[in-house]
Amino acid sequence: MKASEKGKAKKPGAKLTRKTVIICAAIVAAAVLLGVIAILFKNGYIKINTPSKKNYPVRGIDVSRYQGDINWPELSAQNISFAYIKATEGSTHVDPKFAYNYAQAQKTNLRAGAYHFFSFDSGAESQAMNFISQVRPYERMLPPAVDVEYYGQYSASKHPDVSAVKAELGKLLELLYDHYGIRPVIYATQAAYKTYIRGNFDDYDIWIRDKYFTPGDNIVNWRFWQYSDKGVLPGYSGSEKYIDLDVFRGTAEEFERYGFPEK
């Protein structure tokens, strides 16, 4: 082979090498970009859900001990209309910040409500008594809410018996309804909703958690929507940097009439 022919034979290989370098560089750049986007999303700088104020004029939050010391006058001035506050969990646990948060929230222009974290491991009666012992009704109180989601060892693929959970949850809801005269709201993640709530409890409003999409028509009776767990507002100083953000499905006038005792 002539020298000139050898040179020509090497050129395709050289071009292939350059192409490989370009492809690898593009892959690395894409990976870095995706990583940056993931970090920004995780830290709340990028929000997929941004419900319009026109469609959802009534905004709110939900809090627990993780928000630490809350300055309720300051927090209530953040263009919000309501706050759901964690009260109890299971048969015995009481959120250590509940009494303070519930009392102070009532001194603001907010409508306050209390929620109970439902335990798969406790009976309905003891859970109801735990909540009732801590939550006294007041004039503008929002309906009690029961939070149904997986925790600990439970997941969508390894969950408690469906019929047993539905039975206990139904008892708890009835006990709270009988006591407060207000039909409770059911908070649920999408996974818990599909397993336990969908097709059942049609008489109860749903507070759905969905960080990615607007609740669809498949959840006919949704009333509240937790659209973000990455909110940041002035007025709290706990170990948790973020605060959950919610909207009410309805007008401001409908919200003011919402949830008053039926009995």
Image (cartoon, rainbow, N blue to C red):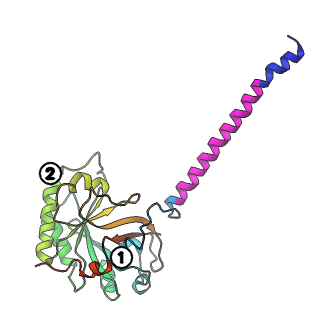
| Label ID, residue 226 | none
Residue at 59%, 46% (x, y): give it. Answer: 31
Residue at 14%, 72% (x, y): give it. Answer: 177
Which quadrant is home to the N terminus? Answer: top right
Residue 130 in percent (x, y) is at 19, 72
Is residue 151 in view? Answer: no
* Left or right, 255 with reference to 167: right
Residue 75 sits in which quadrant? Answer: bottom left
Residue 237 in percent (x, y) is at 46, 77
- Most extreme residue toward the top is 1
Q: Which residue is mark 2?
A: 163
Residue at 30%, 51% (x, y): give it. Answer: 153
The span picked out in magenta is 12-40
Residue 43 in percent (x, y) is at 51, 62
Is 57 a magenta residue? no
- Most extreme residue toward the bottom is 107
- The correct choice, above or below, for 25 with respect to 244 in the image is above
Pick the residue in front: 153 or 219.
219
Query: Please, what is the three-letter code of the amino acid marked with disc 2?
Result: Ser
Residue 235 sits in which quadrant? Answer: bottom left
| Label ID, residue 58 | 1
How far apart, in angstroms, are the residues tagged by discs 1 and 2?
A: 35 Å
For the stretch drawn in magenta, what is the main secondary structure?
Answer: helix
